[in-house]
Amino acid sequence: MTRQSVIETPDDAFDLLTNIWLKYQVYSGHLWARSGYYQQSGAFGFRDQLQTSQAWLLHAPEKMLEHIRFNARHQFRKGTVLHWWHPITEQGLATNMSDDLLWLPFMLNRYLQETANFAALSETIPFYDGGEATLQEHALKAIEVTLQRFSDRGLPLIGEGDWCDGFSALGLDWKGESIWLGMFLYRILLDWAELLSRHSPEQKPDLAEKYCDAAEKLKAALNREAWNGQWYTGATRDDGKPIGDPSAKECKIYLMAQTWAILSGVAVGERRQQVVQAMLEHLEGDNGFLLLYPAFQTPDENVGYITRYAPGLRENGGVYTHAATWGVMALAEMGLAADAMRHFRKLNPILQVHKDANRYVAEPYVLPGNIDGKDSPYYGRAGWTWYTGSAAWLLTIAYESIAGLKPVQEGLKIDPCILSEWPQVKILRKFRGAEYHITIKNPEKQCGGVKEIRLNGKTISGNVIPQQPAGSYAVEVTLTGREGNRRL
């Protein structure tokens, strides 16, 4: 195997988790074994392993493309997909989960940004129920299905659940709405509008224009219908009652709608500050961001099985690690380095076990799927280790959000968000056939903002390294400063 990308920082626990244990968990546990101490499965989850496959982008992106093709073969001709399936038998479960199918266009775009291999869009892939289409057509079918599932208010319907499986009864009558899904779809629409106008094998300016128009209307609807004056609601039930609203006794605020309001670009201006403030004030716990607060206290057949978990357990007011990693990502997106690193460290099992092993309980070298929240008598207890896609996301966040190495179509963008007390960060990053030995120097104790980039001793313009021929390159980055090494 070729050399893997690595990071060197002044934080030994950060380096150990990022360079060794997250990768081990990603490949051995979630992609290959597809099993763990708390869940014996063996099945492929359409959205689960597809998200995890992004870890291959750091050193073997062709393996991510293999997984994308694999997923596309488990899509139906109409555009919906299997929620999960077992290899060999190919038997799986088709559901009305509303987000599964959208991870195909989202992760395909991630692959294209990394590799610029737009020829992959023309590959022909069979459908699960017969027939075939190009990979691009597979992705577009998923988007088109979702655009047909909208409420009268202009928001996407939640169906049997969105990212949160536990909201399993919110939309059984196809009236309940998902705010997070709207934000996720908004980002996908904009990304694919650009792809279709610039890099599609068949130029589709009309479809690109349609997606831009749909995105604009969706953003307006989200800011009009989902903003409650303090933060974004999370969803609505079939009867119209909001979830994640301050008017409720339970689940007054829902993390996913806040993080993705920032990550998608739906929240703009002062609202971005308000959203982050709400996250830090209402959802920060000892072990990261709670998924929601306060927890549901009694089962509710109109919400779903999330309410049948004990308060503070798993999705019901616990730290659901997958969602909490996006909290780190959102803080870094805002340039809040101290907040982002504090939350990264709260998720780091090495540090949590060092702090209180008897309370944490779980292994010190692997991310848990969840950690009990404030409403649990076992607050701080971790569980559901190994079999969680959060490992791939935290690995991605370490490289793209903290170290700030972000693949874009033009090349490798450098936009760090590090602690001001870190004098330097070193990264070995493989990108489009080249190997970059990057040193981020921080002589003025800043947390971000690129002053200068030197490629093999020569200054380049801007903060994007253009694609280079195969070879090894020395990159020296000097920071200039950014307001953000503080808590809001």
Image (tube, rainbow, N blue to C red):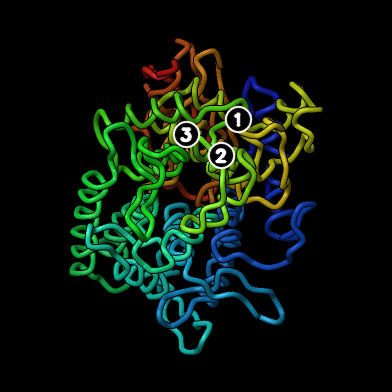
- What amino acid type should be assigned to the residue bearing mark 2? Gly
Name the side, left or right, on which 440 lies relative to 413: right
Q: Nearer the viewer, residue 58 or 383?
A: 383
- Residue that appears at 49% across and 82% down: 127
* Residues under numbered marks 2 and 3 in contact, where contact means CB atoms less than 8 Å apart: no
Q: Which residue is mark 2?
A: 317
Q: Is residue 136 above or below residue 445?
A: below
Name the side, left or right, on which 189 lies relative to 477: left
Distance, label 2 to label 3, CA atoms, is: 30 Å
Of badges 1 and 3, nearer the viewer stands 1
Q: Position of residue 183 (x, y in %)?
A: 34, 50
Q: Position of residue 89 (x, y in %)?
A: 70, 82
Res. 167 visible in picture: yes
Res. 472 visible in picture: no
Q: Nearer the viewer, residue 16 or 389?
A: 389
* Residues under numbered marks 2 and 1 in contact, where contact means CB atoms less than 8 Å apart: yes
Q: Which mark is residue 101?
A: none
- Total tally of numbered discs in the picture: 3
Name the side, left or right, on which 418 lies relative to 278: right
- Residue that appears at 22% across and 57% down: 153
Distance, label 1 to label 3, CA atoms, is: 32 Å
Q: Which residue is mark 3?
A: 404
- What amino acid type should be assigned to the residue bearing mark 1? Lys
- Residue that appears at 21% across and 58% down: 212
Residue at the bottom extreme, as displayed:
130
Q: Position of residue 32 (x, y in %)?
A: 73, 61
- What amino acid type should be assigned to the residue bearing mark 3? Gly
* Secondary structure beneath label 2: loop
Q: Quick one: label 1, few (<14), some, or many (20+) residues within 10 Å?
A: many
Q: Which residue is mark 1?
A: 374
